[in-house]
Image (spheres, helix red, strand yellow):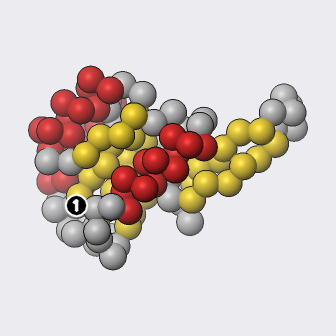
């Protein structure tokens, strides 16, 4: 996979596997957008790796769209999704169990 000059949007990127993915992508020359609820940790990691941070609850369509918009503004032709809940396209779905509408976030 081409990492250098790609843009990675890493959800859950402020800690754990997401943070490791963000670091690995940045070390490989990618531009990284960290999307997470943990603002302090996400902002700190973004500074460390030269990336960007956006506060994002992946269950919120508006938050997911803001993360996608942040990724898009990195001005790269190559976009790559990664991590525990990768984001590049938003689709609403009605849960059969709860009847509530939620956002499904997945790579296009």
Residue 19 appears at what percent x and percent y?
A: 29, 37
Residue 33 appears at what percent x and percent y?
A: 31, 49
Q: Is residue 63 left or right of residue 21?
A: right
Q: Is residue 22 visible?
A: no
Q: Residue at 36%, 40% (x, y): give it.
A: 54
Badge 1 element? loop
Q: Which residue is mark 1?
A: 30
Residue 2 appears at what percent x and percent y?
A: 28, 72
The local crowd at label 1, few if under 14, some if 14 to 19, many if 20 or more residues have their Cα within 10 Å, is many
Residue 51 appears at what percent x and percent y?
A: 21, 48
For the residue pair 41 and 68, the one nearer the viewer reads as: 68
Q: Residue at 60%, 43% (x, y): give it.
A: 61
Q: Is residue 47 left or right of residue 92?
A: left
What is the quadrant of the C terminus in the image? bottom right
What is the quadrant of the N terminus in the image? bottom left
Q: Is residue 52 left or right of residue 17?
A: left
Depicted 101 relative to depicted 68: above or below? above
Q: Residue at 14%, 48% (x, y): give it.
A: 50
Q: Residue at 23%, 58% (x, y): give it.
A: 31
Depicted 47 relative to depicted 69: above or below? above
């Amino acid at each position: 996979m081409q990492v250098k000059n790609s843009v990675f949007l890493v959800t859950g990127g402020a800690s754990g596997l997401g943070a490791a993915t963000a670091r690995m992508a940045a070390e490989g020359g990618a531009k990284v957008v960290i999307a997470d609820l943990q603002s302090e940790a996400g902002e700190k990691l973004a500074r460390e790796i030269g990336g960007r941070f956006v506060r994002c609850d992946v269950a919120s369509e508006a938050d997911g769209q803001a993360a996608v918009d942040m990724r898009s503004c990195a001005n790269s032709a190559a976009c790559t999704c990664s991590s525990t809940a990768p984001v590049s396209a938003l689709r609403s779905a009605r849960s059969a169990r709860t009847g509530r509408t939620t956002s499904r976030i997945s790579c296009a």
